[in-house]
Image (cartoon, rainbow, N blue to C red):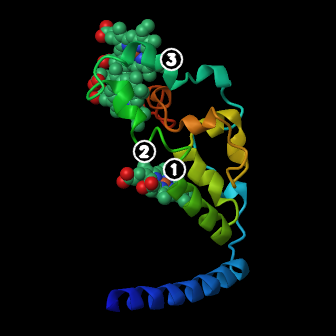
Amino acid sequence: MRRMGFLMRSRRTGAGMAAILVVTMAWAQVPMTAQDFHVPGTQVGDMPLSALRPASECKTCHGDFDPANEPYATWAGSLMALGGHDPLFFAQMTTANQDVANVGSFCLRCHVPAAVVTGHVANPSGSSLDARDREGVTCHFCHSMVDPQYQPG
Ligand code: HEC
Ligand code: HEC
Ligand code: HEC
């Protein structure tokens, strides 16, 4: 009973704090542009979508033989495979967008990298993402990465 009373009190305080936070954020959004978040490497339009292979293709040979150790099953249950579905990520990205305009495109570049290839990264809210984007950090994304500022040696 004592513990319940404590929980109810802190919940009331929490609601009050949330209301104050929403008001503060609405007034204090940092006005950044998409250009402010430019990073090197692949840009929208650099690469056709057909060049990025879906994980289901890799599964043909790298899956369905040893779920505890094979590349496919160990990837499929990871946060990388779930990057395009992770509710905690999308909740925090929404908050980040309220704090800093356009920052969502920066988050999506790592968390949902196919969006740079499809071009859906241009919408920082994430509401343009499709099923292909939501495959997350895929096999082929990692296994086709190169250093964008490569120096021989
Ligand atoms: C037709 C079957 C097949 C498909 C489909 C396939 N692979 Fe492979 N992959 C292989 C085989 C066989 C090897 C081992 C080759 C060897 O060691 O000579 C291999 C090796 C690899 C290696 C290890 C290379 C190394 O140096 O150890 C990686 C990484 C890899 N594949 C990634 C992928 C990815 C990513 C995809 C999906 C885009 C994929 N593969 C699709 C058959 C396949
Ligand atoms: C440079 C790449 C990169 C960028 C940019 C990035 N993240 Fe992440 N994020 C990661 C990685 C990698 C992890 C996993 C860290 C770990 O496992 O320790 C992660 C983890 C997270 C998690 C935890 C997910 C979970 O379910 O545990 C959240 C939430 C998150 N990021 C939100 C954001 C937000 C919001 C932005 C933009 C403001 C952002 N990230 C930008 C790479 C990035
Ligand atoms: C986050 C990046 C990342 C993702 C996603 C990823 N890999 Fe890898 N993979 C690596 C790295 C790094 C290595 C180790 C390379 C080395 O040690 O030379 C590796 C090793 C491998 C190997 C070498 C053999 C082995 O088992 O060690 C194969 C095959 C492979 N990955 C296939 C896949 C497949 C198939 C998927 C998707 C189901 C996948 N990878 C997803 C980064 C990734």
Q: Secondary structure at mark 1?
A: loop
Question: Real-space Cα distance between discs 2 and 3?
Answer: 20 Å
**Badge 2, how many Cα within 10 Å: few under 14, some, many 20+?**
some
Left of 121 or right of it: where is 134?
left
Residues at marks 2 and 1 touching, judged by CB atoms closer than 8 Å: yes
Residues at marks 1 and 3 touching, judged by CB atoms closer than 8 Å: no
Residue highlighted by disc 1: 86
Q: Which residue is at 39% across, 38% downward?
A: 77
Sequence-wise, which precedes: disc 2 or disc 1?
Answer: 2
Residue highlighted by disc 3: 57
The kind of residue tagged 2 is: Leu
What is the x, y in percent for residue 86? 51, 50
Q: Using the image, tell me which numbered label, if any, was put on residue 79.
A: 2
Within 8 Å of ligand 2, the CB of disc 1? Answer: yes
Frontmost residue, 94 versus 4: 4
**Badge 1, how many Cα within 10 Å: few under 14, some, many 20+?**
some
In the image, is residue 3 above or below residue 139? below
